[in-house]
């Protein structure tokens, strides 16, 4: 059984194999012609989220390396409020906006088959199309309706209603963020006060006035002592056998070396600088200077965080006061001048194609059953057996 034989068999019955599919195509064209026409409108917008609050948690993480600041990070939680650009998409396609749209345009009179609220929402959600271009970030909202004015006004309302809800939510989030930031600011101010007391106690406990200045003075004195000691050693070598001069020089050198050791040599565990002198042991001062620098480093971190928080408070106060739209219209909704569906040509082609397939299959099966179609006898026998099994009562 070749393709040519099948084609000849069908052409011999062209009244059915060609006539009926053509009639079906014409019928599909006519049905599409008389069917209600739908018009599509589209609006394209770009989301402008404005300024964003810096992430304070990163500052806390850096500051928490110090034991003095380690408790701040745990109390803050998530203060950084990065604006989520997906939030608008959630709102525009959300239940609240959709139900507000249904009520605004009385869509229950259009979707009459939807008897329940949930059914109405599901049907409307299928008809409205909201997409976002991942490359440009442009959001499009499309809707088809029999009334072209309704389609235009509906998509405008959807993006505007979502914009209003977004602004409201952003204001609420800004107020919450301000509250968190002020709480954190109070914690930092308290830490600054506590650290100030620690630094004051550090100076009092160690009998210090100005550690860096005292260390510089001590080093200058040590340089002078070392120069005098070296000069005395030279003088001793020059004195030769003059025992009286050498003894005097050695006595004076021993006194200087003793004073030098007090300021440069090892110190005891309970060493404290004398309140009667500004000079201090340089080795002891070097260790205390490292301790002081750690405290001052904590001060700098705290003040850096404080400046960042105050800047963010000002920014969030501005966001809370704003009532500007967060969307920029790239393409406004329009009145369509040509229907979007039904497509008459598509209906005609689909109806013709389906009818061809059906008629070809029906004619071939009928020909096999009646013995008119050229095929092997066992195929015809098996086909009749299958039909008898299928339609057996």
Image (cartoon, grey):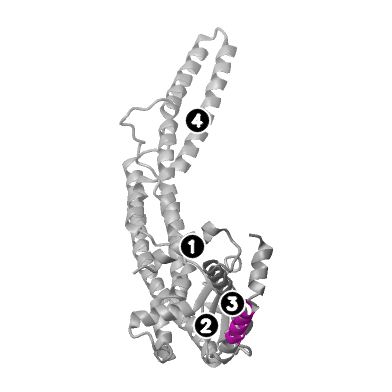
Q: Is residue 200 visible?
A: no
Q: Residue furthest top?
A: 241
Q: Nearer the viewer, mark 4 or mark 2?
A: 2
Looking at the image, residue 359 lies above or below residue 234: below
Q: CA distance from mark 1 to mark 4?
A: 118 Å
Q: Nearer the viewer, residue 15 or 338?
A: 15
Q: Nearer the viewer, mark 2 or mark 1?
A: 1
Q: Nearer the viewer, residue 73 or 337?
A: 337
The first of marks 2 and 1 along the sequence is 2
Q: Which residue is located at x 44 percent, y 66 percent?
A: 387
The first of marks 3 and 1 along the sequence is 3
The first of marks 1 and 4 along the sequence is 4
Residue position for label 1: 383
Q: Residues within 10 Å of mark 1 (few under 14, many from 20)?
A: some
Q: Which residue is located at x 35 percent, y 36 percent?
A: 274
Q: Position of residue 196 (x, y in %)?
A: 36, 52
Q: Is residue 221 magenta?
A: no
Residue position for label 2: 143
The tag on residue 222 is 4
Q: What's the magenta region?
A: 15-29
The first of marks 4 and 2 along the sequence is 2
Q: Which residue is located at x 53 percent, y 68 percent?
A: 365
The tag on residue 52 is none
Q: Position of residue 382 (x, y in %)?
A: 48, 59
- Give the image quarter of residue 1: bottom right
Q: Are marks 1 and 4 in contact (CB under 8 Å)?
A: no
Q: Residues within 10 Å of mark 4 (few under 14, many from 20)?
A: some
């Amino acid at each position: 059984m070749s393709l040519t034989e099948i084609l000849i068999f069908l052409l011999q019955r062209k009244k059915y194999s060609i006539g009926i599919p053509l009639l079906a195509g014409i019928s599909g064209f006519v049905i599409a012609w008389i069917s209600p026409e739908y018009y599509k409108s589209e609006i394209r917008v770009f989301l402008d989220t404005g300024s964003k609050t810096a992430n304070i948690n990163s500052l806390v993480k850096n500051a928490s390396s110090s034991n003095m600041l380690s408790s701040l990070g745990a109390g803050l939680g998530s203060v950084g409020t990065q604006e989520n650009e997906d939030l608008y998409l959630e709102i525009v396609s959300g239940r609240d906006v959709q139900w507000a749209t249904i009520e605004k345009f009385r869509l229950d009179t259009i979707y009459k088959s939807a008897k329940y609220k949930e059914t109405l929402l599901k049907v409307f959600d299928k008809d409205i199309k909201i997409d976002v271009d991942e490359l440009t970030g442009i959001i499009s909202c499309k809707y088809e309706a029999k009334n072209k004015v309704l389609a235009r006004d509906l998509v405008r309302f959807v993006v505007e209603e979502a914009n209003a809800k977004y602004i409201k939510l952003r204001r609420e989030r800004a107020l919450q963020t301000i509250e968190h930031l002020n709480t954190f600011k109070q914690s930092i101010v308290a830490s600054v006060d506590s650290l100030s007391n620690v630094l004051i106690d550090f100076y009092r406990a160690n009998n210090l006035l100005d550690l860096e200045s005292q260390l510089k003075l001590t080093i200058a004195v040590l340089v002078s002592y070392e120069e005098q000691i070296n000069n005395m050693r030279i003088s001793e070598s020059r004195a030769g056998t003059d025992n009286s001069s050498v003894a005097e020089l050695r006595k004076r050198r021993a006194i200087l070396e003793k004073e030098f050791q007090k300021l440069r040599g090892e110190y005891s565990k309970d060493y404290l600088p004398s309140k009667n002198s500004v000079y201090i042991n340089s080795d002891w001062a070097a260790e205390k200077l490292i301790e002081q620098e750690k405290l001052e480093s904590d001060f700098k971190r705290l003040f850096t965080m404080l400046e960042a928080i105050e800047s963010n408070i000002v920014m969030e106060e501005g966001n809370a006061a704003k009532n500007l739209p967060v969307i920029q219209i790239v393409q406004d909704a329009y009145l369509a001048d040509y229907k979007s569906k039904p497509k008459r040509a598509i209906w005609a082609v689909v109806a013709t194609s389906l009818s061809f397939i059906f008629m070809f299959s029906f004619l071939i099966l009928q020909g096999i059953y009646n013995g008119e179609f050229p095929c092997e006898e066992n195929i015809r026998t098996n086909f009749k057996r299958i039909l008898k099994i299928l339609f057996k009562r």
